[in-house]
Image (cartoon, grey):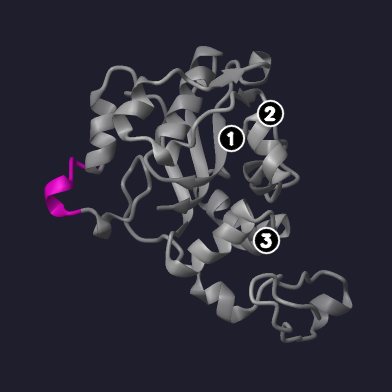
Amino acid sequence: MGNCLVCHEELASSYGWGDLLGLSKSDPICVSCDNAFQKICGKLCRICGREWDEVPVENHHGDICFDCHRWESETETADLFKMNRSVFSYNEHMKEVFALYKFRGDAILAQAFHKHFRETYEKYFKKEQLTLVPIPLGAERLYERGFNQSLLLAGLLAPLKVDEPLNKKDSVKQSKKVRRDRLQQENFFYVTEPQMVSGENVLLIDDIYTTGTTIRMAAKVLKKAGARDISSLTLIRS
């Protein structure tokens, strides 16, 4: 028995054969907090993984949404990556937990996402032979935060091997830039270990998919380094 990683209430205990044989692993969060997360399900945009019911009919372009259609219509970003799949929507509960995890340094909260993160990986990517690559932080941001949240998420898929061929220059946060600025800026990602991805299918791991800029900028340098198909698994779709 322990305490919920989110609300810190005492976890209800149950005891069965799995516990007796040492096969069970207790959930790190309570049922109430777990149920408050909104899992993404149903029909999705083929590329970005947005729930199709959230896309206005006038923004349907075949099986992709308007944002993905714009990305695919531009020469520099067309066909850069295969698809993104996310675990949770960015509801109010997730906003609070995510702030604790990412911005207030509560790294242990990664364990709260373990079950659902692995389930999403197994649903969409388990059958493929993929090289896991977490989105890196710049040196300054890593020093401020003390950990890379994307690397911790990748670790939830152990014993799968995680490679770190990507590095990142310190830059202005993407959330503070308009889409045009994001597209026109110098790519802040670079590959230091191209042999890790050359000829490989890559699964990028990140915490949140918002506009798709970060994933596509990372995919661009990975493609240049010789990577084949590139997809992404993110914790949240905002």
Q: Quadrant of residue 167?
A: top right
| Badge 3 element | helix
Q: Is residue 17 above or below residue 128?
A: below
Q: Determine the main secondary structure of the stretch shown in magenta.
A: loop
Which of the pair 27/90 is nearer the observer?
90
Q: Are dots 3 and 2 in contact, CB under 8 Å? A: no
| Badge 1 element | loop
Which of the pair 125/231 is nearer the observer?
231
| Percent x, y of residue 220 | 46, 20
Query: Which corner quadrant holds the N terminus?
Result: bottom right
Q: Nearer the viewer, mark 3 or mark 2?
A: 3
Q: Earlier in the sequence, mark 1 or mark 3?
A: 3
Point out which mark residue 1 bears.
none
Magenta segment includes 62: yes
Q: Is residue 30 above or below residue 98?
A: below
Residue at numbered disc 2: 164
| Badge 2 element | loop
- In this picture, residue 215 sits left or right of residue 20: left
Q: Earlier in the sequence, mark 2 or mark 1?
A: 1
Residue at numbered disc 1: 135
Magenta segment includes 115: no
What is the CA distance from the residue labelled 2 to the residue labelled 1? 8 Å
